[in-house]
Image (cartoon, helix red, strand yellow):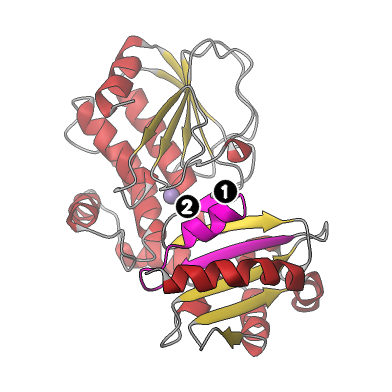
Amino acid sequence: MSRAEVAALIRAGDRFAVTCHRRPDADAIGSAVALAVILRELGKDVAIYSVDPPPRMTGFVPGVAEVPRAIPSGAFDACFVCDAAAEALVPPRPPGLRGPVVMIDHHAAHDGFGDVVLREPDACASGLVVVRLMRELGIDRIPEAAAWPLYAAIVSDTGGFRYSSTDAETHRVAAELLELGVEPWVAASHLFERWEPQRMRLLADLLAGLTLDLDDRVAVLRVTQDALARVGADAEMVEGMVNYGRMLEGVEVAVLLWEQPDGGTKISLRASGSADVAAVARALHGGGHRAAAGARTAVGLDATYAEVRPLVARAIEGE
Ligand SMILES: [Mn+2]
């Protein structure tokens, strides 16, 4: 559906539920909070919820800590789900929903789930899709209460304005957010620094076990349940670790293999060149972006890497 059609749907409704993908990241929770602010600006009744807690690092963003965990009751004309590329990531819908589930997303790969899908893969973050939708609705100025949530969404999904998704529009919107009072150093310090000692120890452990493969063009990092227990790290601390593999000169794809409590493996993939890791993830029934994707297997780390390796080899040859 087009942005204009989604805007028409918003104008026609009165009561909306707003949520984001399960185990939200800063873009998911930030775009949901911002969308709720914008819908309220239009005089709509809005119930926001996130069944899983937002990451600790987003606790500084105004509005995030107040997002309820409970699925809201009452009647809703639509339920907006921010930043979710697949049905498995969509939280339960409010029982009183009498309208469509509307997906607001920017992922290149999307399973098509949702009654209405507004997906703009050229946007660096779902937060940016929310800003575009806001303008479509005739609001020119970003409401102040949406500024920090949108900045957190954009700065985290672009890795601090470093990824290839960063463009002029990204910086234009960021400039607008700064004019509304956002302080970049405060956001950066919360989102990228302030590490717990356990997280730093986990990184040391990961780097000690880093291996290079396929003519040093692929870096492989492994996280075991044993290692997590040894350093006292939790699941949230594993997020983003794959990027360290990508920082090596000559590495085109970084693979993080993360042993799950059920014996399966979660795979995170990052590309630094033009290799398409979304294609690798899709072959393993996962998804994501061209340069950042993920999947899961039901087998252990070594068996998983045996599946991943030929796919990654093809991805780096195919660029
Ligand atoms: Mn996102």
Estimate the x, y position of residue 98 in percent, counting from the top left. 53, 10
Q: How many marks?
A: 2
- Residue 170: image quadrant is bottom left
Residue 267 is a magenta residue: yes
Q: Which residues are magenta?
A: 265-288
Tag 2 and tag 1, C-beta contact below 8 Å: yes
Q: Is residue 307 left or right of residue 249?
A: right
Check residue 54 in the rendering and tell me which mark sits there, or answer none.
1
Question: Can the viewer see residue 197?
Answer: no
Question: Percent position (x, y) of residue 3?
Answer: 28, 28
Q: Residue at x 79, y 69 (%)?
A: 225
Q: In the rendered image, which residue does mark 2 sit on?
A: 26
Quarter-wise, where is residue 36 in the image?
top left
Residue at 34% in and 66% down? 163
Dot 2, how many residues are within 10 Å of its Cα: few (below 14), some (14-19), or many (20+)? many
Q: Which residue is at the front of the view, 273 or 189?
A: 273
Q: Is residue 114 above or below residue 12?
A: below
Callout 1 amino acid? Pro
Residue type of the residue flagged with mark 2: Ala
